[in-house]
Image (cartoon, rainbow, N blue to C red):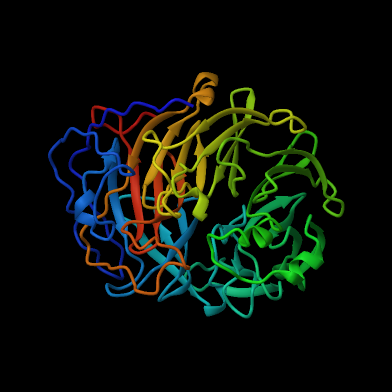
Amino acid sequence: MRPLPIAILLVAALVAGCITPPEPAPATNSSSVKVGPVDPILLTHDHRNASEHADAIHNMELLAWAPLVEKGQWPKAHAVDMWENYLFVQTGGDHIGFVILDVSDPANPIEVGRYTNPDTNSGDRCIMVSEDGKYVFLAADESEKGGIYAVDITDMANPVDVAYYEIPQYGAHTLYAKMVNGQYYVYALSFGVHILRLEDQLLGGKGFTLVSRYATADPTQIAQFTETDQGGEASYIVRDLYGHDLYVTVDNGTGRVLMYVAFAYDGFKIVDITDPRIPREISKWVPQDQYSPYYVHTVDVSQIGDRIIAAVGSEVFENRHTEAPSPVWFLDVTDPTKPQLLSTWVNPGQAGADGLLFSAHDMRIENGRVYLSHYHGGIWVLDISTPENQTDPKVLGYYAASMDNGYVIPEDCCFGFDIGAMPVFFDVEVKNGVAFGADLFSGVYVLRLQDPNGAPFAE
């Protein structure tokens, strides 16, 4: 795909919000309009010095900042999910668990609840709220009690553990939750997909039931795996054996249930789980170009017009991929048996991922706009609202600036990778055009897309 031109018009009057506790520092972004371009991925700067990229903004307004922990501590804000006007932020640093923020006024996030459990430290999309707002589900893979936790949030001020499903040795890195026929299902990703059903505690149930498991892993291969350099080729072995992310849809007309899985080096898969006891793979797509094979990392699915579009993201971290830009692929999956590649998007400067620092990561789609967390490259917004844009996605805006807020990068931070930078956006959630970006080191940034004249972008 050809590089996209960028004409930067920096937004004005950025106002930081706060939560209690702790007390955030004021924003220090300039109040005057500046002309770029200031491409956050091409900008040469000290990655640890936030002030050196304070102008790496394009059509995005900072509404608020929620640090989540006291200054001098590490939030490790790793994953976010929304239910109605509440934002749930998984944290894994000096506070391990999650924080609940009322964001009904996005410019003034207010903490309303906090859950603490040192056994719930985990990986990527490791938190999701049930569609009825009763439960938070957490995936844990960084403790001896790895697996899936269900937390009752009926009283948000006092979250309560109600169920636990153990996945020995490796735990679960990510999860997805969906209500199907009035029942709670959780799909836990660890060497395939564990399909779980929660027997509702409030109705006298006894916790999680394993319904089935969808996997392509050979148990012998798993047993022979030994940890090695994160960027080395030997890490292919384990990464190829488990799905990393997924999205589940239910067709209300037919009752058909589909699971879309980003399955590492095995590509993007669509699995029919209408009968959850018998998962049935119906299609598979594997990206191919000069940088293949890719670690297929993330997926989000949305109906846009008469098409169903899957945004499938990579994570680029290997030694051989240092100079490779990290792609996001857009596929037409209207016919789930025949995924069709529409376009491949990479950062407009086609800059290499540089050992994860500038990799694409997680994303959400709302109203034909893709909100993408891009590690130290910031939060990006892409327009795929029309068939034309689906074949050539347009950049609407991005935000990679960070306030000089006094929060610092811990010495033991970065999972064996060189991503000691400020900010590092791991995840993003969106509601009504307002994005909530989870920065690993300083909490949550609340952002709103602007049009080129500085007004809120029309919804």
Q: In the picture, which quadrant includes the C terminus?
A: top left
Q: Is residue 447 left or right of residue 184?
A: left
In the figure, is residue 8 to the left or right of 214? left
In this orientation, does residue 387 appear? yes
Q: Residue furthest top?
A: 388
- Residue 204 at least partly seen: no
Taking 34 as reference, is 184 above or below it? Answer: below
Q: Position of residue 235 (x, y in %)?
A: 61, 61
Front-most of residues 254 and 227: 227
Residue that sits furthest to the left in the current view: 32
At a point 22% along the width and 62% down the height, the residue shown is 405
Residue at image coords 24%, 64%: 24
Quadrant location of residue 402? bottom left
Residue 95's spot in the image, x, y percent?
A: 43, 75
Out of 134 and 36, give the one closest to the viewer.
36
Counting the numbered discs, the total is 0
The image shows residue 129 at horizontal and vertical percentages of 58, 58
Name above or below for residue 133 compared with residue 72: above
Quarter occupied by residue 189: bottom right
Percent x, y for residue 258? 74, 42
| Residue 306 shown left or right of residue 54 in the figure | right
Quarter occupied by residue 301: top right
